[in-house]
Structure formats: structure tokens, C-alpha cells
Image (cartoon, rainbow, N blue to C red):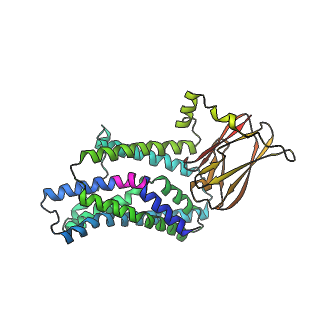
Amino acid sequence: MSWWAIFGAGLLAGATTCAVAQGGLLVGLIARQKKAAAAAGLAPSGQVDGVREDLVPVLGFLAGKLLVLSAVGLLLGVLGSLVKLDARVGGLATVLAGSFMVVLGLSTLGVPPFDRFVLAPPTSWTRTVRKSTRSSSAFAPFLLGLATVLIPCGVTISMMLLAATSGSGMAGASVMAVFVLGTAPMFAAFGFVTQRYASAESRGLGLALGTVVVVLGLVTLNGGMVALGSPVTAQSVVASVTGGNGGQAALSPAPALVDGVQVLHIDATSGGYSPSSIAARAGVPTRLVIRTQNTQSCIVFTLLPTLGVQATLPMTGETSIDLGTLSSGEVPISCSMGMYTGTIVVS
């Protein structure tokens, strides 16, 4: 386990999908707070005080996120040390996260009836902190930070799975804490700039964020369906429309039998499977050998969902998987979140 790699994954998440999905919610919350503060005559005055006030919501959000994900990492580490987790849990979590992102995006766009769904703390909770504008501005983002556990981005789910296989509660908590710290620089910059310069009345900002969150939610949802082996995915729909046979002509021949067994080789890198499609013979015993080399993504949790096979790959090494005797057709290979896929073409 590389702590720098985990921190780097946090930087990546903070700059990409997590920033859009979770950062979009933070932007919306900050905008509502600015509007409410201006209406109440509580907008900060003075450049120095303004800078401090701009940072308060962001720090509250990051504190909530750090607390909840560290706790989740602790729980997953303990659970993983006691029970061998099914890697398909990642696929289910991805489906739920994608569905939640779509709902939030449609809410941001104001699409009925989703426009009634608002992720905000109950009014009764905020009454206890309204004695101070600063504590009030930090409290709601803190609760939003806690709520991000309900909308994990793809990289976050990968880190959760890593925490579950870390071997202990403390290791799992450390994985998630280091990951969240990695997201902090981009979230801090994102939230600060929004707090300082974004207009609470900017309809265009809401439309842009809502649209991107919906699109990413659909992509995330599809990835989960792939990981769970669903027959209905974006890839299967495209294949049914186009015929889906164009890539098969470029396949290398199936390997020769060795002691009556065909051995298939595939590399699992941080960016996908190589080759993405491999040929195999039907009706003969088959073994799949997956090679890794400094691999650090959700691909280390590899699934063959239609065969009910799963494997946890080392960062570097070879993993041999007995697939039994295959029937003609296509056997999908996927990481635990459906982000990376491959296919065994059996004929």
C-alpha cells in the first residue's frame, strides 16, 4: 500500500468527478448562504474578515467529509478483517451513488418532482448555531460533508474497497483520511473561489452543474450495472444497435492447449485491461492469468460477473484464476465499479 498513491488518488478525485458531484453541492449551498446573509444584512465587510469568512464554509465541509469517511474506513477495515467481502459490493455502491447523483442533478436543474429534493440541514438544527454568523456558515457545510458518504465518486468507492482489504480498522481509517486530505487542496480552492466570486443569482451556474452531475451520475450508474453483470448497459445497447462484432476480427487466436488447459493472459493496469478482448476455445478447461505492475485503481478488484468469479489482485504480481469449461459467447471482465472492462470471446 502506497500512502503517496492514495494521496494522489485524492488529488485526482478532487480535480475531477468528486469536485463536480460533491463540489457542485457545496457551490449551491454557499450560494444559498450568501443570498440569505445578504438579505439579513450579515454579509461580511472588510477584506480581511471577508477572506476568513470565505474559508469557513470550505473548512466546515472538509471537516465533515474527513470525519465521516475516516469512520467509514475504520468500519470497513474492521469488517474486512473479519469477513471476506464480495467485490460486487462496489458495483452495488456505484449503482446507488449514480442514482443519487442523477436525483441531485435533476434537483439542481429544477426538474419536477426532483426540484422538491433539497440536501440541506433541518431548520431546527441550525437554530442552535445562529448566534454566530461564522458558526452558522460552517455548520451546514459540515453536515453536507457528512452527507458526501451518500454520494461517493468512483475514486472514493475504490478507496473504500482498499480500506476494506487493508487488514485492520486503523489501516482502513488511515486510507480514507489520507485520501480526503488529498482532495482538500482542490476542494478548498474550488469552494473559496465560489464563495468569493460566484453570484447567488447565477442561474447559468446551476444549469451547468446540474447537467454535468446528471451526466456523471448516468455514467456512474452504468458502471455499477456493468460490474453487477446486468444484461442492460450502455455497452450492450450500443452493441445491439451496431452489431457489436467489429472488434472481434482483430483478436489474436486462442492460445494452444498446455496439458489440456488453455491459459489466457491479460494485463490489468491502472488505466484498464490489455488487451481489452481475448479469444478462447469453448469446451476446454480454462485458466486466466492476470498480471499487474504498480496497479493502483479499482481494477485490483476484478470481476467476471457472469461466472460469479472475483479476485483481489496484488499491486504487482500474477493472479491465476480457474474459469472451468467455458461455453460459446462473451464473458465480460470488469473492475469492481465497472469503470474498466474487458471481454473473453469464446468460440
Q: Is residue 95 left or right of residue 146?
A: right
In the displayed structure image, the side of residue 216 where residue 302 appears, left or right: right
Q: Residue at x 21, y 57 (%)?
A: 34
Is residue 34 among what the camera can see? yes
Q: Position of residue 272 (x, y in %)?
A: 60, 50
Q: Magenta includes 175?
A: no
- Magenta span: chief secondary structure: helix
Left or right: 5 in relation to 281: left
Of 71 and 272, which appears nearest the observer? 272
- Start-end of magenta stretch: 17-24
Residue farthest to the left, as pictured: 41
Q: Nearer the viewer, residue 27 or 70?
A: 27
Q: Name the residue located 19 percent from the left edge and 55 percent from the top edge.
A: 35
| Above or below, 28 relative to 171 | above
Was residue 21 drawn as part of the magenta stretch in this picture?
A: yes
Q: Position of residue 123 (x, y in %)?
A: 23, 56
Furthest residue in direction front, as rendered: 250
The answer, for residue 233, to whether it is visible in the render is no
Residue 221 placement (x, y as % from top left): 48, 43
On the picture, is 40 further left or further right than 2?
left
Q: Quadrant of the N terminus?
A: bottom right
| Residue positioned most to the right | 259
Which part of the image, by quadrant, shows the C terminus? top right
At x 83% / y 43%, what residue is drawn? Answer: 256
Quarter of the view holding residue 107: top left
Residue 340: x %, y % from top left: 58, 48
Count of labels shown?
0
